[in-house]
Image (cartoon, helix red, strand yellow):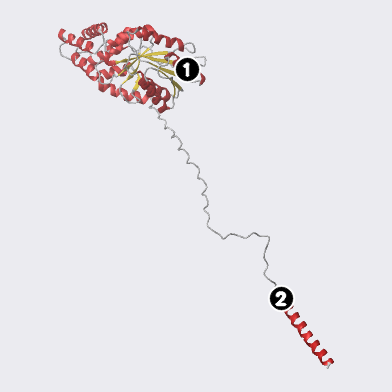
Amino acid sequence: MTVLYLVIGIVVLAAIIAVGLVTTGRRRGTPPPRVDTQAPARAPARDVPVAEPESAAPEAPAAPVPTLERPEDPASRLVRLRQRLAGAQGGFGRGLLALLSRERLDEDTWEAIEDTLLTADVGVAPTQQLVERLRTRLRVDGKEAADPRGVLRDELLQLVGPDLDRRLQISGSDGRPGVVLVVGVNGTGKTTLVGKLARILVAENRSVVLGAADTFRAAAVEQLTTWGERVGVDVVRGPEGSDPASVAFQAVQEGIDRAADTVVVDTAGRLQNKAGLMDELGKVKRVIEKQAPVTEVLLVLDATTGQNGLVQARVFSEIVDVTGIVLTKLDGSAKGGIVVAVQRELGVPVKLVGLGEGADDLAPFDPGAFVDALLG
């Protein structure tokens, strides 16, 4: 009996051990899930706004490069202005020619010729001289044999002065630029003349510096600056109301530093009877000549002022030694005789004439072309 209980006990114990081994094997075959203790727990994904990169500030537009104008060639300009002068001045010359072409040249006719010349501002002395020479030639040669137009042309040409030196002195020496000083009374067009003269010089391939010494008028300075910008010419300017002599001095210094060919200095308009203003003009010239000689002094006259222009010319010539005359507004005027009168008065030639408002309506004065234009 004891043996039986022992056997049963052994069997039960063996069964328990067997069940335990099976359970342990199953647990080893299926490892438990691992928890990664090294990695932090992640938050659920969400949309995060991302800042857009700042766009670069838009670049300022580049300043437009001005298109430089090419001034008209002096030769072609002269041809065009001859045609315009002929159209403007033909009335005066044609009137003389019509009188000389009458069948009978009596005293009334000669008086009419004198009146025509005086009305055209030729002046008393030149008129008397011309009439006397015409009477002599037509009487000696005989009116029938003489050509009234040819005789009149010859005598007018001698009166205008074909042998005067009308070249512009625009070149300096010793490496210094030529200096052109432009003077005149108010309203004659000095600033415009300076701009147009710059165009002539640029067309001749000369390097130019402009001096805006009319410091009393801001508009004059701006106007001259515009003229310079159009053809690529530097303009030296100062504060409004500054000393004109100082600006002129700086302009010439700039011309020397840049090795420019020519410096053109604009001056303020002034009345010929204002002693203080005229003395100031003399100062401008003296200050300039501390650096370089003034090679040309151009007096700008309005052709329509007639005999009053002679008074202006005399006073300016005494102050700054005028070397050349510029006649503006000659277009549309019957006052062409002022050319003769002013040359007689000063002994100074007319060198340039302005015949319109266009940028290139300025040309060297040609006596032959002028007389031909007078005769139509």
Q: In the picture, which quadrant includes the C terminus?
A: top left
Q: Amino acid at mark 2?
A: Arg
Q: Quadrant of residue 263?
A: top left
Q: Horizontal placement of 221 versus 335: left or right? A: right
Using the image as rendered, state which of residue 105 and residue 255 is in the foreground: 255
The residue at the point 32 percent across, 26 percent down is 358
The kind of secondary structure element at disc 1 is helix
Mark carried by residue 325: none
In the rendered image, the residue lying farthest to the bottom is 1
Using the image as rendered, state which of residue 169 and residue 46 is in the foreground: 46
Q: Quadrant of residue 23?
A: bottom right
Mark carried by residue 250: 1
Q: Give the vertical position of 168 relative to 65 (above or below).
A: above
- Circle 2 residues within 10 Å: few <14, some 14–19, many ≥20: few
The residue at the point 44 percent across, 27 percent down is 232
Q: In the picture, which quadrant includes the N terminus?
A: bottom right
Distance in Å between CA atoms under marks 2 and 1: 107 Å
Q: Amino acid at mark 1?
A: Gln
Mark carried by residue 27: 2
In the rendered image, the residue lying farthest to the right is 3
The kind of secondary structure element at disc 2 is helix
